[in-house]
Image (cartoon, grey):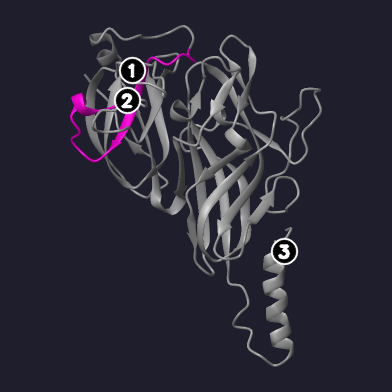
Amino acid sequence: MKNNIIKLAVIASATMLAACGGSNDNSPKLANFSLGVSDAPVNGALSVMVCFNKVELTGNGLGKQSFTIGSDTEAAAANDKCRDANGNVIANSRGIDLLLLDGAKSEALISGAKFAAGNYGQLRLAIAEGSYVVQEDGLKVPLRVPSNELKLGGVTLSAGGTFNYTLEFDLRKAMVNPVGQPGYLLKPRGLRLVDNSEIGHLTGQVAEGLLINNSCTVAPVDVLRPVATVYLYQGADRPLAELSDNGGVNVYQSYASTNVYFDGVSEYHYSIGYIDADTYTAAVSCDIIDDPEQADDITFLQAENVIINANATPVQLDFTP
């Protein structure tokens, strides 16, 4: 592991004290830290490749603690998914197709790194060039991140503890296609940094009868096309009329949302992963278009309360006629 200069200074200082017969109580207290990424699906894309370069924690009075892809043993290995305009592989980058990481699936960026314990004010992900989206028509277009960096909330790492975090990309909120600009833009909104010990997962089915009764699409030939959506709102018994879409301004803002897909036989499935343990209202709609930059006319068909516990076993919630 490539140590931070400030961390080296702290260790050296503690070693000198010990050599002189002084106390070594000032030696840095460490915590084990791991970070993975996951995703909820988005419409209109066959692939969303994000090129990760570095993970940083800032604050804690020790300056920037950073781990670079392909350089530090605790960081993920680099791959050849990210290339520049000339087709050359971008060094110290790992391309991850977020659309392969739906529900409870995730991929590690850092595994078992040793960080100085304490309160960190911000976690930052440095994004390399080369990120892209493959649209449904097969066209490959660039995916840009403002300042090539995603800035997220902080974390608290206690001495001797082991912490596993996941960054959940809700692309239905975070990925936008700005008018007059090339390609897509990835924004930090809709991204959730969660402690894996405090989250659960949700999965379920939407009955075909419910879809038919509401003139929704059923049994599409292309199973990659969603037939409905499921939204999640914090708190129980949220009225349908007060629920917002991802860009709306109604009373209750969506915590997360996902698509419902036909399995090619007879069932319609959905899943939402890495949800903070809490009580929620889950609502289903046949409207699949939701621009995160504006309020869309979303009609909700039905809502159900669901309790998410901090448990690796997904909670099952089905929508029936």
Nearer to the camera, 212 or 61: 61
Give the CA distance from mark 2 to mark 1. Answer: 7 Å
Residue span colored magenta: 223-245
In primary-sequence order, the first of circles 2 and 1 is 2
Of all residues shown, which one is farthest toward the front?
Answer: 180
Asked if 130 appears above or below 112 in the picture, the reply is: above
Answer with left or right where residue 62 lies relative to residue 5: left
Residue 3's x, y, as percent?
72, 61
Give the CA distance from mark 3 to mark 1. Answer: 50 Å
Of all residues shown, which one is farthest toward the bottom?
Answer: 21
Seen at 58% across and 33% down, the residue is: 146
Residue denoted by label 1: 296
- Residue 225 is inside the magenta segment: yes
Three-letter code for the amino acid on which mark 3 is drawn: Ile
Nearer to the camera, 227 or 174: 174
Circles 2, 1 touching at the beta carbon (< 8 Å): yes
Residue denoted by label 3: 5
Answer with left or right where residue 91 lies relative to residue 277: right
Residue 8's x, y, as percent?
72, 69
Seen at 61% across and 28% down, the residue is: 144
Seen at 54% across and 69% down, the residue is: 160
Residue denoted by label 2: 248
Element type at mark 2: loop
Nearer to the camera, 115 or 121: 121
Three-letter code for the amino acid on which mark 1 is drawn: Asp
The answer to which quarter of the image holds residue 220 is top left
In primary-sequence order, the first of circles 3 and 1 is 3
